[in-house]
Amino acid sequence: MTNSVYVATSLDNFIATRGGGLEWLNEVPNPGQSDYGFAEFMSRIDAVVMGRNTFETVIAFDSWPYPVPVFVLSASLKTLPGNVAGKAEIIHGDPRDLVKQLNERGYRNLYIDGGRTIQRFLQEDLIDEMIITRVPVLLGEGIPLFGNLENSLNFRLEKTEQLNDALVKSSYSRIRE
C-alpha cells in the first residue's frame, strides 16, 4: 500500500496562484508535448484522492485526465456534475479512515492530490512517496505545497532528473523507523 504525491511546484513551493491558477505551468516550453512521466506514474495507481478545490480545477480541463476512480474529499459538495458520473465519488472523513475505507474497497495505491489534502495526509504521516517537479518560476504568493507539521518527516531522495532543459523532477520515499 502506497500513498503518493505527484505535483509540480514553483521554485518558491507554490502549487497554484492565490486564486488557484495554473497558467504558469504552461509557460515552460514543451516541444515534444511530454507528460513528464505522468502516464507511467498513473499506471501503478489504483485511485486518486483529491480535495474539492483541486476537483473544481480538474473538471474545467478539456478532458478527464484520470484512468482510475477519483474520490473527492469534501464536506461541502453534495453532488458531482453528470459528466464525471462513474469516474468520481464524494467521500468524507479524516485521512486515516479514508485510507482504511479505500484499502478495504481494494484501492491500495493512492494518488493524493491538492494542497490542503496533501497537507492533511502529511500531518497524519500517510504519504509514502512524493514526486515533485520544480518549475523555474517564482510566484511570490499562492497555494503552498507544504504546511505546518507537528513532527518532522524524513524522506530519502530516490532520483532526480532534468526535463526539457527547464524542469527538475525529484522522487522521494518516506523513511520509516
Image: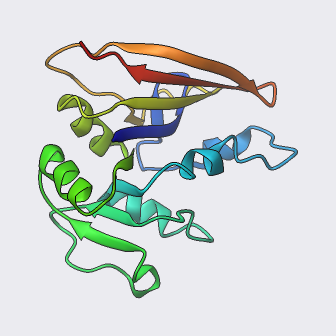
The front one of 20 and 148 is 148
Task: Tell me if 105 is positioned left or right of 164 in this view.
Answer: left
Colour scheme? rainbow
Asked whether residue 88 is in view, the answer is: yes
Which quadrant of the rendered structure holds the N terminus? top left
Image quarter of residue 130:
top left
Task: Tell me if 146 is positioned left or right of 100 in this view.
Answer: right
Image quarter of residue 80:
bottom left
Picture mark count: 0
Q: Residue furthest right?
A: 31
Q: Residue at x 44, y 50 (%)?
A: 20
Please determine whether, in this image, residue 112 is positioned above or below residue 123. Answer: below
Please determine whether, in this image, residue 83 is positioned above or below residue 16. Answer: below
Q: Position of residue 171 (x, y in %)?
A: 53, 25
Asked whether residue 113 is in view, the answer is: no
Q: Residue at x 37, y 72 (%)?
A: 88
Which quadrant of the rendered structure holds the C terminus? top left
The front one of 149 and 2 is 2
The front one of 141 and 55 is 55
Q: Position of residue 28 (x, y in %)?
A: 74, 37
Q: Position of residue 3 (x, y in %)?
A: 35, 40
Task: Tell me if 28 is positioned left or right of 59 in this view.
Answer: right
Q: Position of residue 135 (x, y in %)?
A: 63, 30
